[in-house]
Amino acid sequence: MVGDPALAEVRMGALASREQLDDVAARVAELRADAELLLGDTAGFAPRGDGVAAGAFFPPTLLLARDAMRSAAHDVEAFGPVSTVLPYDELDEAVALAARGRGSLVGTLVTRDAATAARVVPQLAALHGRILVLERDAAPESTGHGSPLPALKHGGPGRAGGGEELGGLRAVHHFLQRCAIQGSPAMLAAVTREYVRGAPVIESEVHPFRRHFDELRVGESLLTHRRTVTEADIVNFGGVSGDYFYMHFDEIAARDTDFGRRIAHGYFVLSAAAGLFVSPAPGPVLANYGLDTLRFTKPVAIGDTIQARLTCKRKVDRQRRDSRGVGQGVVVWDVEVRNQDAELVASYDILTLVAKRAAG
């Protein structure tokens, strides 16, 4: 239903101007030179609503071009509610038809076959700014063909302009200047206000987990005591976790691997490191809600000794308070786990929620 958008039954309003209305009508006339009109005859077209007679209303129009490869639809764009059906017999022909458009903001592939999507989307990607793969499982939540979304590119190559429409953080980035900074870790940490490995640390007399958000300094660090990994550690961790992977339990099979011996679970190393640096008593650290950039860089075997360094890497003030009126912030901690030869065996960031000191 076309007409006044204030009416509940209306689903489509007017074009931007009378000039656009005239332009769309002219483009449809060109398209009809080699296409049949299936829907959208202007005869008897009557938009709903009061005062619509002078409006720029155009009926939804659907055309059919039986000679799809030669259709004017590849060159003539009616910038309005107009579509042309281009029949095809096989997927390669459909991709070739899409390429004839010489660039598009959005394309939609309607299929429930994953193999078809895997085959067609890479071929269409160079021709479109975005591709919607529409199938019945996702259709109820789909935003539809071409809906601008802040997290997605909205723009396209070739005739679509070659650029990107501004939306979300993407728009902000157009106004920022990229600058590469070179320097020592100490200088980089000072400039970015974020701890960089290799920069001097602040050896803390108080466990960093005992400090409130507003007391904690970027670079504040704790070097833990050491722990030697035993066979019992590996066996117990396997029993608790249910992880009996042969690399941890089968001496003969492990001997034939690149490691040449049984090694500890990576997640045991992670857990043991937490046991080294966590301060167990209640305090300002409220929650651990994730890990980033986790890498196990060297195996830990029976008899190896590990030690962890925990360093305040970054602070983010959440600018909010809990139900008791206590403020909170996010602290990202850099964690290095090294063996008895000072070799890095695990590296990651921990994200924690830390309370501010209560006012008063």
Image (tube, rainbow, N blue to C red):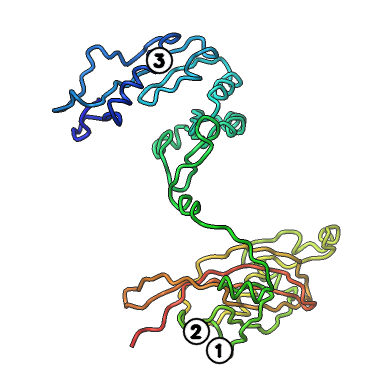
Side of 96 relative to 359 (left or right): right
Is there a contact, CB below 8 Å, between mark 2 and mark 1?
yes
Question: Which of the image's four quarters has the C terminus?
Answer: bottom left
State the mark number for residue 63. Answer: 3
Q: Residues within 10 Å of mark 3 (few under 14, many from 20)?
A: many
Q: Secondary structure at mark 3?
A: strand
Q: Residue at x 48, y 50 (%)?
A: 170
- Answer yes or no: is residue 333 visible: no
* Residue type marked 1: Val
Q: Which residue is mark 1?
A: 206
Q: Residues within 10 Å of mark 1 (few under 14, many from 20)?
A: few
Q: Secondary structure at mark 2?
A: loop
Q: Secondary structure at mark 1?
A: loop
Q: Which residue is mark 2?
A: 211
* Residue type marked 3: Leu
x, y percentage for residue 56?
26, 26
